[in-house]
Amino acid sequence: MRIALTSIFVDDQQKALEFYTQKLGFVKINDHPMGEHRWLTVAGPDGPEGVELLLEPNNDPVAQAYQQGLKAKGKPCTSFEVDDVKAEVERLRGHGVLITLEPVEEQWGGYAMFDDSCGNIISIHSVGI
């Protein structure tokens, strides 16, 4: 058993696609119509054959409550691994990404958080900071 797909809720699929590809550097893998929405997945640039991230439309009241509740508490809906948290925060800031938590150092490494502009707080982490 392995993880091949995971998802996050987004309030606008097109805006999410632009954010995740243009600002984060992910690669679009699938983009297929599904009624009024799309089966829209992206993956990291260094492993497009790996785990895909489904940019899932937030069109369900339960999903909306979950997404809004996490964001209201400043909690990330997921975390992405990076080589260097501080360098990645500066790269994201250069792309106009709103950093919601500056890099925090821990014994194991470090983390930071940003707003994906589609309804989510995302954490980035690295082993070693």
Image: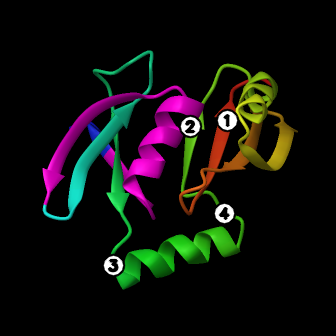
What residue is shown with label 4? 75
| Real-space Cα separation, disc 4 to disc 3, in angstroms | 20 Å
What residue is shown with label 3? 60
The span picked out in magenta is 6-34
Mark 2 or mark 3, earlier in chain: 3
Q: Amino acid at mark 4?
A: Lys
Q: How would you rate the neighbour count of disc 3 (Cα within 10 Å): few for under 14, some for 14-19, many for 20 or more?
A: few
Q: Amino acid at mark 2?
A: Phe
Q: Is residue 102 left or right of residue 32?
A: right
Q: Amino acid at mark 1?
A: His
What residue is shown with label 2? 80
Q: Amino acid at mark 3?
A: Asp
Location of the C terminus by quadrant is: top right
Mark 3 or mark 1, earlier in chain: 3
| Real-space Cα separation, disc 4 to disc 1, in angstroms | 14 Å
Residue 35 drawn above or below residue 115: below
Query: Looking at the image, which is closer to me, 21 or 7?
Result: 21
Residue 98 at what x, y percent from top left?
75, 48
Q: From the viewer's perspective, is the residue at label 4 or at label 3 nearer?
A: 3
Residue 31 at what x, y percent from top left?
23, 40
Q: Quadrant of residue 45?
A: top left
What residue is shown with label 1? 125
Q: In the structure shown, which secondary structural element does the residue marked by tag 3 occupy?
A: loop
Q: In the structure shown, which secondary structural element does the residue marked by tag 4 occupy?
A: loop
Location of the N terminus by quadrant is: top left
